[in-house]
Image: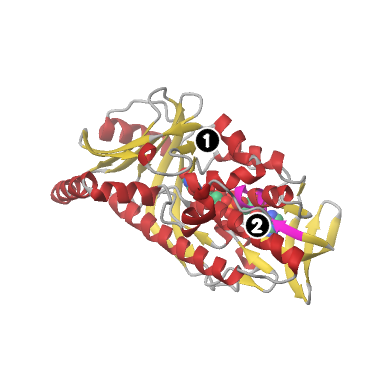
Amino acid sequence: MIDALVVGAGPVGLALSADLRARGVEVEIVEKRPTADGGTRAIGIHSPALALLENSGATEELLRHAVRIRRGEARADGRTLAAIRFDRLRVRHPYVAALPQADTVDVLTRLAPPVRRGVRVTAILQDGAAVRVRTAGPDGDDERRARVVIVASGWAGRDLVFRPGAVRTHHYPDRYAMVDVAAPGEATALVHLERAGVVESFPLPGGRRRLVAWAGTSELADAAGFLHTALRERVGVEVDTTGATTFRVRRAVAPALRRGRVIVVGDAAHEVSPIGGQGMNLGLLDALTLAPLLVRWMRGGEPEGLAAWERGRLASARHAARLAFLNTMLGRGASVAAHAARSTALRAVLSGPGGGVFTRAYAMGFDAAARRGGESGRPGQG
Ligand SMILES: Cc1cc2nc3c(=O)[nH]c(=O)nc-3n(C[C@H](O)[C@H](O)[C@H](O)COP(=O)(O)OP(=O)(O)OC[C@H]3O[C@@H](n4cnc5c(N)ncnc54)[C@H](O)[C@@H]3O)c2cc1C
């Protein structure tokens, strides 16, 4: 019987496996996809997650690939509403490390134990002091036994642990168009809160940027065409948007993260709108604050601290979901009068102490994990 089995080789499952491996735990990771997912979703890793990723050696590697975003600006109608200064936060990594999710996954894959690919978990069954995990893979059906199973399967694998409907999911009506393009410039994050809807522009490594625009609530037939026009009309940017994609947003927080020897982390447990950029970070904090508790459990026999961990992670997920909801509201198109009122109010709030609070919230400074091990720079050893 192995100590720990991780379901899903997304960023969260990989980060957990790499961390457990660094702590000397025997861990196995299985992934239903035969090859790594090359698609890019998350691009920003915040200070608390970077601090906790140091334990496996991932942070140094990630920072070698990333561009460091030290400041941002909220703008409207060509004017700056507020500066967002990550470099003024008193944290271990006073910046956002920006790199495509596929690169993050690449770095973590090298630090994790070899991923068993093409293996889909079909059932998870508690069995006394063990968990039985049924799989279907290239060599047929199989069953593994582990002392603890961590489900990091993203939303797609939620039904492995939750009854249908147990994780209430809110589907926002909003749609967004997105493209990553070559666009050399300053490493400043820009959020344009325009009357016709938000445009976000985030630096990526290699002189590229991620551009995102609110696209209303109806189906988009031509994402590239829409995005091209939206960028030109809203912020005067003319770029080739070929290859643009669309995404919609959901909000879900599971009622619980643990049942006996089965624990759920990452998007399998919660989803927040990408407008705000915290989904992957939440999952990384779930996983990396869980790892030392698992080590103690494996070595000492008692699952100490898990109830407090679960409460803390659920509170963080709800907080992030509220923040993402606020960002989603602020990013919608508005009437002339509502837009003017919104801009005036934001300038007033963000130019005072509210600006610092917003920056800290955006950088996940209110996550309980950020206030403890994550930002101490001394990740707990197992
Ligand atoms: C457009 C967009 C932009 C985003 N930007 C940001 C951002 O800037 N910052 C941020 O923090 N977050 C962002 N996010 C959110 C982020 O992408 C997710 O939160 C993150 O991918 C979740 O990681 P995960 O490992 O929990 O799940 P996933 O990435 O979904 O990985 C789960 C893995 O489990 C595998 N799996 C599923 N079921 C099984 C099974 N039964 N057996 C075996 N394997 C299985 C899947 O194949 C998958 O590889 C964004 C999301 C989107 C859509």
Q: Amino acid at mark 2?
A: Ala
Magenta stretch: residue 247 in it? no
Contact flag, marks 1 and 2 (Cβ < 8 Å) = no
Asked which colour scheme the image uses, the reply is secondary structure
Query: Which contiguous range is marked in magenta?
Result: 4-14
| SS under mark 2 | helix
Mark 1 surroundings: few (<14), some (14-19) or many (≥20) residues within 10 A: many
Please state the horizontal and vertical placement of residue 378, each as a whole percent of the image.
Answer: 57, 48
- Of circles 1 and 2, which is in front? 2
Q: Report x, y in % for residue 343.
A: 19, 46
Task: Estimate the spatial distance between the alpha carbons at disc 1 and disc 2, rounded to whole Å.
Answer: 24 Å
The answer to whether any part of residue 221 appears in the image is no
In this figure, which residue is indicated by the disc labeled 1?
99
**Badge 2 is on which residue?**
291
Using the rendered view, name the quadrant where residue 133 is placed: bottom right
Q: Vertically, is 97 above or below 49?
A: above
Q: Residue at coordinates 28% horizontally, 51% vertically from top-left?
A: 330
Question: For numbered disc 1, what is the local secondary structure?
Answer: loop
Residue found at x 79% / y 74%? 129
Residue 182 higher or lower than 326, as above or below: above
Query: Measuring 34% from the left and 52% from the top, which residue is drawn there?
Result: 327
* Horizontal arrangement in the rendering, residue 210 relative to residue 104 (left or right): left
Q: What amino acid is found at the position of numbered circle 1 in the picture?
A: Leu
User: What is the residue that sits farthest to the bottom in this orientation?
Assistant: 128
